[in-house]
Image (cartoon, rainbow, N blue to C red):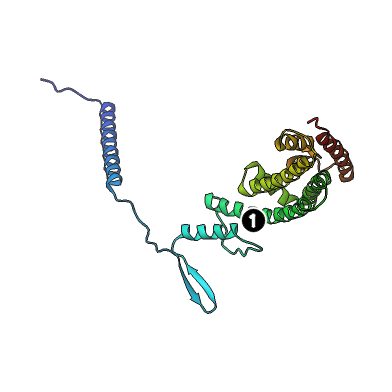
């Protein structure tokens, strides 16, 4: 009885198939073992101690053993800084933590300038002048201070625009405080019958809509190439018309 003959090509083909099958089975087995090992493994814990403050001479030094604790306190210190920030560190990565520090430093610089703006505006709101006069002066000052910032510090102005578009806390606080000052003046004008409308909101909405081009930070940046004196004259004329309308009760 003759034995079946197998060609060399067929033999090599079957040999390759067998090797691949063994490799495939080995990979599947390794995957199952690794998956079960990870599933059953207890979470790894990094050894850490809470921050500890010690006195060294006349100074207080805080020792950190874990990065998250250090970053949290550094960001908190930046946000609470009153006059200056001393920041010395290695180059930060462009990850979430690095971006958090970048945003915090930008917000600190922007917030310091905005505080000076708000202080100047509050001086007008607190003055004993009539409400219509105060409203005219405060809106003119808002436009002037924003434009000066754009002309003197264009890079920082762009960072402020970014904070506005991202609705970061520093931008929201400034908008809230500015709205509060304007609201006080408008309420004072309504109580003395200088302004007439059913509500403060109605008058303020009319005011901000009419003056949008002159007081909105993004619109001011878009008009940067226009002559400043021309814009100031146009704003002054428009303000007089707007305030007259607010007093006539036509809003």
**Camera-side residue of 163 and 45:** 163
Quadrant placement of the N terminus: top left
Determine which residue is flagged by label 1. 108
The spot of residue 65 in percent (x, y) is 44, 64
Using the image, determine if residue 44 lies above or below residue 183: below
Rendered residue at 81%/49% (across/down): 141
The spot of residue 197 in percent (x, y) is 75, 33
Using the image, determine if residue 175 lies above or below residue 79: above
Relative horizontal placement of residue 135, taking residue 47 as reference (left or right): right
**Camera-side residue of 129 and 80:** 129
The spot of residue 205 in percent (x, y) is 73, 35
Rendered residue at 29%/34% (across/down): 20
Residue neighbourhood size for the residue with mark 1, other residues' Cα within 10 Å, grouped as few (<14), some (14–19), many (≥20): many
Relative horizontal placement of residue 57, taking residue 232 as reference (left or right): left
**Camera-side residue of 67 and 186:** 186
Rendered residue at 22%/25% (across/down): 6
The spot of residue 28 in percent (x, y) is 28, 37
């Amino acid at each position: 009885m003759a034995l079946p003959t197998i060609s060399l090509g067929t033999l090599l083909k079957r040999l390759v198939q067998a090797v691949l099958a063994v490799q495939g089975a080995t990979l599947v087995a390794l995957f199952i073992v690794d998956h079960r090992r990870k599933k059953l493994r207890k979470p790894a814990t990094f050894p850490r101690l809470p921050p500890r403050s010690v006195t060294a001479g006349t100074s207080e030094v805080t020792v950190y053993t874990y990065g998250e604790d250090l970053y949290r306190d550094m960001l908190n210190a930046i946000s609470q800084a009153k006059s200056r920030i001393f920041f010395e560190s290695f180059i930060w990565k462009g990850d979430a933590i690095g971006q958090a520090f970048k945003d915090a430093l930008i917000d600190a610089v922007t917030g310091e300038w905005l505080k000076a703006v708000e202080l100047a505006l509050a001086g007008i709101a607190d003055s004993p002048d009539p409400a219509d006069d105060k409203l005219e002066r405060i809106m003119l000052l808002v436009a002037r201070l924003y434009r000066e910032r754009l002309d003197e510090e264009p890079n920082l102005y762009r960072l402020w625009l970014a904070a506005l578009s991202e609705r970061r806390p520093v931008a929201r606080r400034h908008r809230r405080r500015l709205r509060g000052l304007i609201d006080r003046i408008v309420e004072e004008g309504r109580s003395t019958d200088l302004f007439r409308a059913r509500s403060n909101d109605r008058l303020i909405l009319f005011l901000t809509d009419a003056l949008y081009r002159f007081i909105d930070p993004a619109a001011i940046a878009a008009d940067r190439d226009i002559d400043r004196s021309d814009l100031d004259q146009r704003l002054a004329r428009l303000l007089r018309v707007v305030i007259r309308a607010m007093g006539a009760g036509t809003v």
